[in-house]
Structure formats: C-alpha cells, structure tokens
DNA sequence: AATGAATGAGCATTCATTCAT
DNA sequence: CATGAATGAATGCTCATTCAT
C-alpha cells in the first residue's frame, strides 16, 4: 500500500500472475475471468484492456514465461563450455524451473494443452526455440566428437523433451511430490540420453554390418544424418 | 460389458466408434452429444443408457481401446524372446498403432488430455500397464545382462514413453504427416534408448576435463534400485 | 389447467404471445429472454427450440401476425365490391386492428423498427403485400373510373400507409388514448385521400407555368397512369 | 449553447457532426462513443463535458438540427404568400432537406426512433412545431377559402407528415437512391393532398353508382414515360 | 477544460443431461 | 430399451460512463 500507488505498469503483471495461479488452481476452463480479476485486484473489464480474451491471456503467459525461462536457460548454459556438461545443465535447469514454479509448470504443462488454439493453430515459437537450444547442444557435441554423428539432433530434441516433459507432468500432477525426486530423475534421464548419444564406445546396436544372429534389424536404416523427420507445420 | 447382450449388441460399439471420430474431428469440448448420436444412428438419450456422461464416454474409449492396444502389443511381443528385440518391437508397435488409427490416436494423444478428470482424478491403469510392459522388458534385459543394472526401469519407462509420446503427438498434430516418417523416427529413438541402456560399454562419465576419481556414482549413477521415482497419485 | 395438458402444439404459440406482451411492455431491447420464458411458462432454452434467437422471434411475430392481419383484411374487403367502399374498409380495418391489439400494435409499430436487421436487411414481404392490397384497390378504382388515372398507385399506397401509420403510432404512444378517436381519424384521413384521388372534379392545382389562377397543373408530369414505380426490391 | 464560448467553440459542433455521421453509418446502438470521439478528434470523456450521455447526444442532434430545418423552412415559406403554394413549398423543402443531408436524414428518420426515451418519454417539441407550420398553412388556406373548412388541420398535418415521412424513410433506406425520384414523389403527394383538401369542388361522396363522365385528366397524361418514382431497393 | 485508463453491470445463448412417453 | 423435447445452469465480454490527474 505504501508504494503500490504506481499501479500503472504492474497492473498487467498482476493480471498475469493472478491468472497463472487461478489457471493452475482451477484449470483453464473452470477459471473465471472474475476470479482472476479479483485476485489481481482489478475489474473484470480491465483484463480486456491488456488481453484480447481469456485464451489470449493463456497464450501470452506462455509467450512471456517461456521467454523468461529461455533467458534463464541461456544464462545457466553460459556457465559451462563443455557440450556434455551443458546438456546436463539443460536437464537440471528444466526440472529446477518446474520445481521452483509449480503453478507456472501446471499452466505450461497441463492447462496450456487444453487450448484448442494452442494445439491446432498456434505456432509456439518459444517452444521451438527452447527445443532448438538442445538441438544445438547436440550439434556442438557432434562437432566436438562427443556425440555420434549419426544422431539426428532434431529427433533427439523431441525425444529428450518428451522424456523430460512426461516426467515433469507426472511430477506436476503428483499429489505426493516429496516422494518424487526430480533431481535424481533428471540425472537418470540425462545420463541415459548421453550414453545413447555419445561416441567413444563401440555401439553395440545392431549395425548392418553385424551378422550376429541376435541382431534384429540387420538392415536397420534408423539413422538419417541430415535433417530428417520434419517438425509439425 | 454389462448388459448389451440383448437386441443390438452393436449399439454401444457404434456409439464408441462415432465418438472416436467426432472427438478426433471436432475436439472433445466442441463435440456435441447430438453429433455423436446422429453419427451412431441413435437418439441422444440412448447414449446415456450406455455411458454415464460425455466424459465417461471419453474414459471408456480410453479403457477399451487401450486394452485392445495392449493385447496387440502382447501378441506382437510374443513373436520374439530377445529382450532387446522386444523393446524394438514395442516402439514399432506404438508408432504403427498410431499410424493405423489416426482418429483414435488423436483422441488418446490429444483430446483425452483435455479431460480435467483424466488428468487430475482418474487412475489410468491401462496406461500403467502399457508402461509396465516396457519396464518388464527392461528388467528382462537386465536379467539377461543386456541392460545395465543401474538403469531404473521405472524412470526408463516414463522417459521412453515420453519420447515416443511427444513424437507421436507431433505426428498427430502435424498437418503434413506424409513428410513425417514415423517408422524412421521409431528406430532412431529406440536405438538411442538401447544404446543408453545397454551394458557392455563402460559409461563415460561426463566432464572430460574431470579425471578426478570423485566422480559421482561411477558405477551406480542416479539409480534408485527400489521404489524409484513415484508415479502420480 | 384442465385441458392444458396438450402443451405440445401451443408451446410455440405461448412463447409468441408472451413475447408480444413483453416486447410491448418493456421494449425489444430491454425485454429479457427469461422474462418471455417465465411468462410463457417454459424454460429459457425452450425458446431456442422454436426460434433462432431473440431477433428471429421478433421477425417471426411480424411474419405471422401480419399474415393474420392480411387474412382479416382480405375477409373484410370481401364484404364489398365497390372500390371506394373497400378503400374505406381498408382504413377502418387498419385502425380497428390496432385498437383491438394494442400490444401487438406496439410491437409492429414501434419495437419492430428497433431491429437493425428489419430495417436494413430484412425484406418485409408481408408488409409489401399489405400495401399492395391498397395499391390494387386504387387500380380497381381507376379501372372503374372512380380514381383519376394519373394517380400513381405505388406512391399512393406509401403515402396512405404513411398517413395511417403515423396516426397509429401517435395513438399507440399516446398516454391518453381515450382522448384520441381513432374511428374519427380513420374517416377523416380516408376521405381526404379519396377526394385527392377521385375523378370527377377538375383539379385545381396551381403550377408556375400556369397563368390561370385556378388551374394548377395542366402539364403536371408527376403522374403516371399505369402501375409504374415498382416496389422495393 | 451554454459555455462553449471559451477556447474551442467548435469542439461541441465537431462532436455533433461526428455523431451524425457515425450514427448514420453504424446505427445508434452499434455506434461507440469512442468512434465518435475519434472522428471528432477529442477524448471519450470530453463528450461527457458537452452531453449528458449517448442518448442525450442523439436528442440534442434532433433539437438543434430540427431547429435549423425549421429556420430553413420558414425562410422558404416566406418566399410566397399563397397558402397553396406554400404547402407545395413545404413538401419540396422536406424532401430537399432529406436529399441534401442524407446522413442527418438517416439519423432523424431511422436512428432517432430507436431511442426508447425519444419514443416513450421525450416530448419532441421541435417536431410539433414543424408539424404546426403545416397546420397553420391549412388554416390559412381555409381562411382564404382555398381549403375546405371541414378539414381538421391537426389530423391533416399528421397524415401529411406521415405520408412524407414514410416516403422519406423508404428513400433513406433505399440502396439505390438514384432510382428513386424524390422530387417527383413530392409533387405527387402534395397534389394528392391538395386535391383532397381543396374547396371549389363538390365533395363527391362515395357513390358507386356515379358514372359521372368527368373522366379525370383524359388529356392530361401526366405521364413520365421513363423510370418514375423509384422505390427502395 | 481535457484526458483516457479503469470500471462493472448486464444477458443471450449453448448443450449436456433428464425423464415422460 | 429407446426416444427426443424440454430443461436451466453457467459466463465471457462489451462499452457507456466516471474521475483522478
């Protein structure tokens, strides 16, 4: 109340913060505009001065919060130069952000995907960028000879993100989060991927040249060196 | 399952098939009961003779279709005894089912997750079972010495499922599915995981610059052998 | 309550009657759907089983009530064969209908014209027909030599309708309707028009080019003998 | 009228002109205060310094514009002393004003009548005055023996105004105004009324059996061969 | 006088669900 | 079992109006 008189610039922020909490608490559809307005300390109509509609509010949250997370991610990655280290840092950062912002995580991981528009029309550029950071780390690892060149960075980033995301969602939805050690999960998953991608160990995978009978797919063409499976349009 | 033995045992099925198509086409929320009823050739009210409500219909679709997929999966896995082969078959089966049942895939991958109840209250046992199959394969691989013992089967199954799922979702939502080679993606991902999990190659712990013996869990990284990362609820 | 069990066919009618009263009482815009529903003894949603929306309800009232009025008009006109008599009957009928159905009159005369769609998009065919009846009477009068052939039936019908309508509106809006004798007004106006249209008296209209002080428009080109100006498209 | 003498005496006028255009263009209800403010080059709130509210703005437009029209009417009528001539001038003036100020005409003829208050509470004195001018002309005609004494000037003015008004509205609402000759319509209507009111011709009471040979204008073809009075499109 | 950010009342409409037949 | 007419709860959004500056 003392210095809250400068309500001008933060009114928009207050709405966003309130929306994150209400969306996380009641779900996007059940959240009423008036709930958000009350929690933000503004009138219902005020929300529409800053956001086109309820769904726009959700998408703006995605845009702005993802931008922040991206910045934080970049800052974290800047602490190391080693590609493999940075991949570990990526996963740690992902889980830590989720742990530290559970309401936001709920919104980004769960509620956002209730938006028809987000799923079917929207182009979540910020998500592509977040994923691309990982793809770049893979490419850097390949350039440094630390990651096998036949790993498709594009597919790898989807697979990696999917793995992190699934575990995150389970944590977010979990009612007993304390029994769910995210830190540990992070390192398990990242080590799994690192082993899966790293060079320096003769891949025991069924290589075409491997006539061993136990080899399942002798002519397995799984790998495409260049940009392969394209992303959704 | 209960009392549809009488006159038209197919009425219930027709409703389910119609619902899958309508849900896939218009989305769960936009789908109207009357749309489904019309497509199934029954009256609106008839749907309520077989299903408690619209969301129940969605959840029944999940239950029954997942049961079918599980059966198919088991049948497919029965074709081989090699744990590694079977893991490959698991992934192939997953993507193949999605490719062959795109409407159902849309419902299970996208629409189902719009259900508040599915996400927050429901216990998707069939999903656990589907995941457990993979966990069992991992354990079998460990028993056969083909998979490192320090791999947590529970976390691995979530990570693996997340990877498959994310790629599947992108394929489902993709508007140019033909440019998205699921077959190829499947083998890329599965080989990545197999390398990550397989034994027979000394794990190269991360920091290249760190030869210090204080390497964390050199032999047992991150793993919790017993009850590991817990699942939701 | 005795024989009102057959609520099936009259539910729609009850809504229309309720709407007429509510529209007349509170005005179209101020009338709430729930007011109409309550007065009709149905649920709000039921109205939408019979009418597309609030404005549609207004337009249906116009269509159906005008059709009734037209039938009554035709029946009244059938009582006489003389064109001049029938013109008198037309005016009497117009005012009588208004006197006997004041709520409906309020809706048709006042509220209907608040509908943007009615004014700008709608094609009030029933109104054209109502007007055309008058135009036909004028033509019949002309054919019988009772009405000057240079009277344009089309303009005459608009002028006549406008005169009746204005007086009707004033009566409808008047707070002291008892001091406003519609019957008398009707005969005044109709006689004025009949004199104005009837043949048998040399027109004394003046015209600038007419030096003869009494002869008005010898060369007056305003008139078209045959049915000329077409009705609104 | 009150205190606009200060800095920008035109601000009020600009608002009125803007309102006329916006009301005519979008309709009274759809017109937004901010539209008017933008077009007038003022802030929304400024409008409320000059007008009580949106409806007041409409009524002020009515008052002031009608006052102007009345002045113009009086000036026009002053050009002639002959009561009959002046009645013709009245009609010409009415239609000419409408033709020359189509946006204003739209507001006065159409939008104004959407105002609940105008219709039900307001006392449109300026309209009474406008009508009274006609009533006075009738009385003058009666005094000069040019109009039958049994014509009720009061009813006549309503009927005449109604006729002019209806035709005006049709013209205003017409989409093809060029095909609608107002000038011609004016003289048709005014001559009809003049004949209806004038003395000097024995009123021929409606006797169907009257075959009086006085065939009207047998040699007066009054005809406009080409496209005549056009109706609304 | 002028501004324009903030307010908040107000309501048509949809559609899942019920139940009398 | 089946029907489908009827129900009625539930809410996002607009925009005229205000008032602190």
Image (spheres, coloured by chain):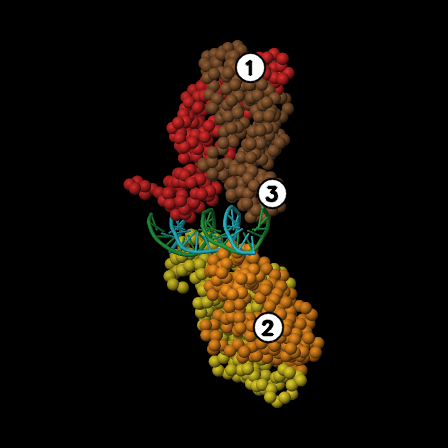
Chain colours: A orange, B yellow, C red, D brown, E green, F cyan
Report crowding for label 3: few under 14, some 14 to 19, many 20 or more residues within 10 A (C-alpha).
few
Report crowding for label 2: few under 14, some 14 to 19, many 20 or more residues within 10 A (C-alpha).
many
Write the residue at 47% across / 77% down.
A179
- Report x, y in % for residue C161: 49, 27
Using the image, determine if residue B90 lies above or below residue C90: below
Q: CA distance from mark 3 to mark 2?
A: 71 Å
Residue D6 - label: 3
Label 3 vs label 2, nearer the camera? 3
Reading the image, the residue beneath label 1 is: C203
Write the residue at 48% across / 82% down.
B226
As drawn, the residue found furthest toward the left would be C2
* Label 3 chain ID: D
Reading the image, the residue beneath label 2 is: A160
- Report x, y in % for residue B1: 40, 64
- Foreground: C45 or B72? C45
As drawn, the residue found furthest toward the bottom would be B213
- Image quadrant assignment for residue D92: top right
Write the residue at 40% across / 44% down.
C35
Secondary element at image label 2: helix
- Foreground: C106 or A191? C106
Label 1 vs label 3, nearer the camera? 3
Secondary element at image label 3: loop
Q: Are marks 3 and 2 on the same chain?
A: no
Using the image, determine if residue B42 lies above or below residue A171: above
Q: CA distance from mark 1 to mark 2?
A: 98 Å
Write the residue at 49% across / 56% down.
A44
Q: Quadrant of the C terminus of chain A?
A: bottom right
The reply to whether residue D68 is visible in this rendering is yes
């Amino acid at each position: 109340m003392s210095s809250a008189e400068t309500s001008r610039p933060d009114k928009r922020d207050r709405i966003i913060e309130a929306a994150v909490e209400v969306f996380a608490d009641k779900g996007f559809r059940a959240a009423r505009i008036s709930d958000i307005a009350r929690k933000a300390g503004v009138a219902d109509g005020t929300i529409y001065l800053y956001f086109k509609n309820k769904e726009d509010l959700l998408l703006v949250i995605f845009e702005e919060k993802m931008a922040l997370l991206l910045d934080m991610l970049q800052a974290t990655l800047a602490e190391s130069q080693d590609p493999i280290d940075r991949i570990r840092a990526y996963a740690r950062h992902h889980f830590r952000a989720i742990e530290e912002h559970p309401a936001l995580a709920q919104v980004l991981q769960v509620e956002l995907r209730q938006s028809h528009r987000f799923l079917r029309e929207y182009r979540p550029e910020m998500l592509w960028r977040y994923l691309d950071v990982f793809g770049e780390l893979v490419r850097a690892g390949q350039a440094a000879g630390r990651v096998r060149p036949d790993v498709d960075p594009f597919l790898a980033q989807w697979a990696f993100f999917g793995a992190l995301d699934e575990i995150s969602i389970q944590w977010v939805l979990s009612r007993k989060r304390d029994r769910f050690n995210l830190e540990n999960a992070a390192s398990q998953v990242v080590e799994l991927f690192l082993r899966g991608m790293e060079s320096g160990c003769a891949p025991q995978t069924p290589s075409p040249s491997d006539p061993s009978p136990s080899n399942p797919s002798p002519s397995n063409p799984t790998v495409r060196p260049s940009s392969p499976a394209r992303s959704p349009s």
